[in-house]
Structure formats: structure tokens, C-alpha cells
Amino acid sequence: MDLTEFPAMSRGDMRDFRIAIDQSFREFTRAYGDQLEQMFHPIQVLLNFIEGLLIGGPWIVVLLAIAAVIWALSRSLRIAGGTVIALMLIGYFGMWEDTMRTIAMVSVCTLIAVIIGIPLGILMARSDRANALITPVLDMMQTMPSFVYLIPVVMIFGLGKVPGVIAVVIYALPPIVRLTNLGIRQVPADVLEAAEAFGTDGRQKLIDVQLPLALPTIMAGVNQTIMMSLAMVVVASMIGVRGLGQPVLQAINNQYFTLGVMNGLAIVAIAIIFDRATQAYGRRLQRHLEAEHG
Amino acid sequence: MAEAVHDIEIRNLYKIFGPNAKAHVADVRAGMTKEELKQRHNHVLALDNINMTIRAGKIQVVMGLSGSGKSTLIRHINRLIDPTEGEIIYDGQDITAMSVPELRRFRRERTAMVFQKFALFPHRTVLENTIYGLLVRGVPRREAEERGRRWISRVGLDGFEESYPNQLSGGMQQRVGLARALTNDAEILLMDEAFSALDPLIRTDMQSVLLGLQEELKKTIIFITHDLDEALRLGQNIAILRDGRIVQQGTGEQIVLRPRDDYIANFVRDIRRGHVITVRTIMRKGERADTPLTLPATTLLEEAARAMTNAEVSRANVVSRDGQNLGMITLSKCVAEMIAPDDSEAVDPEVQVA
């Protein structure tokens, strides 16, 4: 027997196998595509609404509003000031509209990831079985090359914002789920026992003890989710998501070095702003841990 | 104020840790030891046929070294640990048979607990920690805060209401733990090595705080400790636990006077016997001596010996608080008992003088 060649299935079989799966998926898409699109339509509405606000509003108001949000999160004039300067530079270099699109996109994706991710994380923390079931799915979501799940998403939804959001959320969801789970599991056993001893029921324990103590970890998860959403912006632009990703893609295709760098730097700037703001917020949440007895 | 009126009765309580615990209770009943159970079935015997009555309004100390099962025992009273077998009766109800909602109500309204490592909520201020039990129970926040502030003040933490636990020293943190438990205003106070993590001076301090409060609160306190001095200072009754079994129960005086076995004798070896034992326990009951010296029944042996030496007599009559003669005591017996348990005369360590 020839041992140098692996006994793979024959080409004909392989082709039939692929065609069978592709065919049935195509049929599924035809049958349910419209319904699915309807289901996800609210995302499109929300995204359009936020984009409308950011792009349609007077730039100076938008700029101040963003700076105010950043300040509210971080309570740091330095970070808020840095935000203003970064956004002014972005605007000056003509990337205002794309940047606003990206911010809208990242905000919506983060919101969806938080809405799905935190309850999932709580579920995983409370049930070892859920933990065992969901963990491999998260592993897959994190390691599967994003281009692979872009294919079915595009087949169902076509090109546009909604498939972009779905692709980004798939990519950005795992950290918030994992860190919510971790945060809750790391709540010290003695504190939980004390809560038990005072007759706390499950809901009170979750809301008054576990979530507040896990919050800094959960915030780290939100931070990671935002960073990963931003990282996906360029990939998402391949399926028609407008924003800072598209000029980058254009720059790759046409070898426009400056265009690429400028838009790349704008993404970096937004990433830094979001990162510093959420981290500062996370630190503010654990003030009670910092004040150490002398 | 919830003054305790119900005793806690612990009957035939067994706790075995392991996947198949129930099946091994019979083995233990038939005399299998902790070591055998561990070796043959890989189960851990934590509590072995515990029977005790915890008197309402008294401080019951449970003493033992680590691994003796004392922390397991105290957690059965609010069922943080479920027993393998046995019952705990309180106010006509078997705690071990309570449903989940019943148990939750019992924990909320009848018990409060203080922990060795404080177990405060780090994200809540002192005040928020203190009123936790009341909020869980659904007491309106304003009323809860008012009651919380009162107890914070009682444990001497005025001005620290808005501090976070991390900003306080260990002693102060445990005051918060105590305030949190007392604010709950429950009849039963469970204290699991509550002062063990504190340094000696602060520990003595906290013991005084507790004794002072108890004088007026009259709660049923179950106090776990590994420290005999602490046990003798606090406990109106002491149970000594070893390998999950109660080896001796009684007042501190009874235990020091007649330690039941070598294990306990070892424990009490360094205790100044003359400083714990009173004349009433070693007197010859009913006898009267021809001596000018009379001593109250609660006189410590050290004081009695000094009094007899000073008066240059070798005998003294023991009298009750109202002056009635109860018996008499000799100097030699007094000195002998100060040194070691002495069986030259029959003593009745069960004697109780009102």
C-alpha cells in the first residue's frame, strides 16, 4: 500500500459532499432569508438612527457630546481633552463622516454584545453545565477565521450594515461572556457565605453581591469587546460596511500609502479614546478596593 | 429587642463529607472511626453523634482544634451545611427539615453570623454593610439606616459610616462584622472564631465589647474558638470537640476542675486552676467547721487560700449570697486543687449555687 498519500475520499465524493451542503444551505437561505432579515431589521434602524445623529448633527455639538460622554465615563479632563483634539484632527483630515460611521457601528456592536454577553456570562457562572456547553462555542468563535463565517452571513443577508454587525458581534462577543463568567466566579466564597447566612435569595445575591463585585472584571470584558469591534472594522468593510475600514481597503487595493495610514491612525485614535475611557470607568468602580488601610 | 427565649436542641447530629455519606452513618454508629472511614471509603467524618442543648440567652462556647468539626457544627445551626443525619430543634421546629423559603426566613429573622475572616462586603460602606441583613429582609432603607447607625455607634465606630472595609484595621473590620450581625436583631448570634484573626490586645477588647453587649442583649450566642482562655472568659457553657465528637461539656470551671481525658487535660494544663475554680465546687457539702472565716461560694481558690493564710486558719465555711452555710473547705484541699486535680476527697463538679 502506498503510505505517502493519505487515503482521502475521492474527488467525486468530495464534490458531491460539498454540493449537498452548499445546496441545502442555499435552500435554507432562500426559504428563510427574508424572515431572518426582518428579524434583524431593528439593528439596521438603530444603526441608521445613531449614524444620522452623529453625521446629521452640527459637528461642534457632536464633538462636545462625545467629549461629555467620555468625561462622564472617565471623570478625567485629560482624557476628555485628548478626545477633543483627536476628533478635531480627524475632522481636519477629512475623515469626520467615516469616523462617525465607525463610532456608530462600534457602539451598536458593543451594545448588542453586552446585551447578549452579560446574561450568557451569568448563566455560565451559575451552571457548570452551561459553562461546559458554551465554552467550546466561544473557543470556536474566537479562533475561526472571520472570513469563514462571513460567507454564510453574506449568503443570508447580502452586503450591508446588518451582516457587518453580525460578523463583528460574533467576533467581539467572547471576551464579555468569558469575563462576566470569570468575574462572578471570582467573588470570594466567604463573602457569598456571609450573604447566604443573612438569608439572601438568588436574585439578591446576584444583584447586590455578585454583579457589583464582578463589575470591574465585566468592564474589562466590555473594554475588550470594544477593542475587538474596532479591529473588525476593516474586515467588515469587505462586506459593505462603510466607515474607516473602507478607505483602508481601498488603500490596500490601490497601494495608497497615505490614505491607509491616515485612516489606520484614526481607528487607533478611537481605540485609544474608548480604551482609556472604559478603563478609567472600571477603575472608578473599584475605588473601594484602592483605599487601603495604612 | 429580640431577647432569646428558645433553647436550641441538637440531637444525634452526624455529618459525613463524601458522595455517599448517608450510607456510612450506620458504619459510624457501629463504631467505625474517622480514620477507618477515610481509609476504607474515602469519606470524612466531620460530626459524630452530637447531642447538646444550647440554652436561650447564654453564651455557648464550642472549643476544639482545627479539624475538630467546630466550624462545621456552627454552620449546621443556620444550615449553611446540611447534616447527614440528626435534627436541630428550635422553637418547636426542626431546622434540618425546613424548606428553602422557611430556611431563608429563619436565617433572615432568627440568626445572624460573625465570621473569622470578617467576610464584609468590600463594595459596600460600613453603614451599607451593617444594614445588609435588614435590606435583604425588606426593611425600608431609612429605618434600616437609622438602626444601623445606632449599632455602629454601639460598637464604637462613630464617624466611619461612610468608610469602606478596606480602609479599616482588622479590629475595626470585625466591629463592623459584629454591628452587621447585631443590627439584624436576631435571637441567635453565631460567631465562628470571630476574634481569632485579631491580635491579642484587640481580641481581649472585643471580648469585653461582646460581654458588655450580651449583659443587656441576652441573645443565644454560639461562639466557636480554639483558644481556651477565650472560651473560659466568654463561655457560660463550654463544649469541647475532638474529631467531630463532643468529649466534654460543662462550665469552664467544671472542665478545668476535672478534665475528662488526657486530650482536655493537655488543653487546660497551662490554665491557672486557682484562678478559675471556685470554692463551691470543691467544698465538703453540708459540713460546717469551727472557724471564724467565712467565704462567699464564688470565691476563687487563690483568694480563698490567701484569706485562710492571712487569717491563720486552715478551714473556712462557704456561704451563699444570703449568708446561708453551704459547706466548708480546708486549706490543704484548696492548695491541692490549685496544683492539680485531686481525688483525695469526693468533689461534685455538678454543684450549682444560685
Image (cartoon, coloured by chain):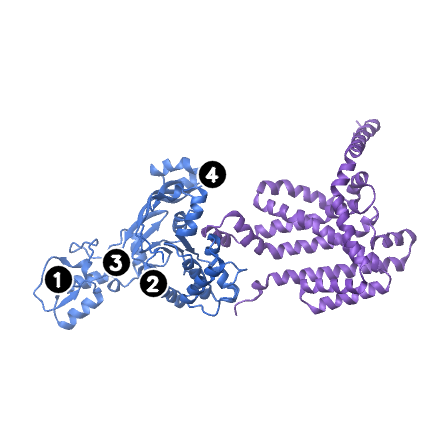
Q: Point out the frontmost of discs 1 and 3.
A: 1
Residue wearing tag 3 = B253
**Position in image of residue A169 (x %, y %):** 73, 47
Q: Point out the frontmost of discs 2 and 3.
A: 2
Residue wearing tag 2 = B211
Whether B101 is drawn above or below B139: the answer is: above
Residue wearing tag 4 = B19
Q: Distance between the residues labelled 1 and 4?
A: 60 Å
Q: The purple chain is which one?
A: A
**Residue placed at 72% from the left, 54% from the top?**
A226
State yes or no: discs 2 and 4 in contact (Cβ < 8 Å): no
Q: Distance between the residues labelled 2 and 4?
A: 41 Å
Specify whether residue A242 is in view.
Answer: yes
Q: Is mark 2 on a helix, strand or loop?
A: helix
Q: Earlier in the sequence, mark 1 or mark 4?
A: 4
- Inspect the image, locate mark 1, and give the three-letter code of the amino acid beneath it: Gln
Q: Mark 2 lies on which chain?
A: B
Q: Is mark 1 on a helix, strand or loop?
A: loop
> Residue B324 — which label?
1
Q: Which of marks 2 and 3 is nearer the N terminus?
A: 2
- Inspect the image, locate mark 3, and give the three-letter code of the amino acid beneath it: Glu
Q: Which chain carries label 1?
A: B
Label 2: few (<14), some (14–19) or many (≥20) C-alpha neighbours in 10 Å: some
Q: Which chain is blue?
A: B
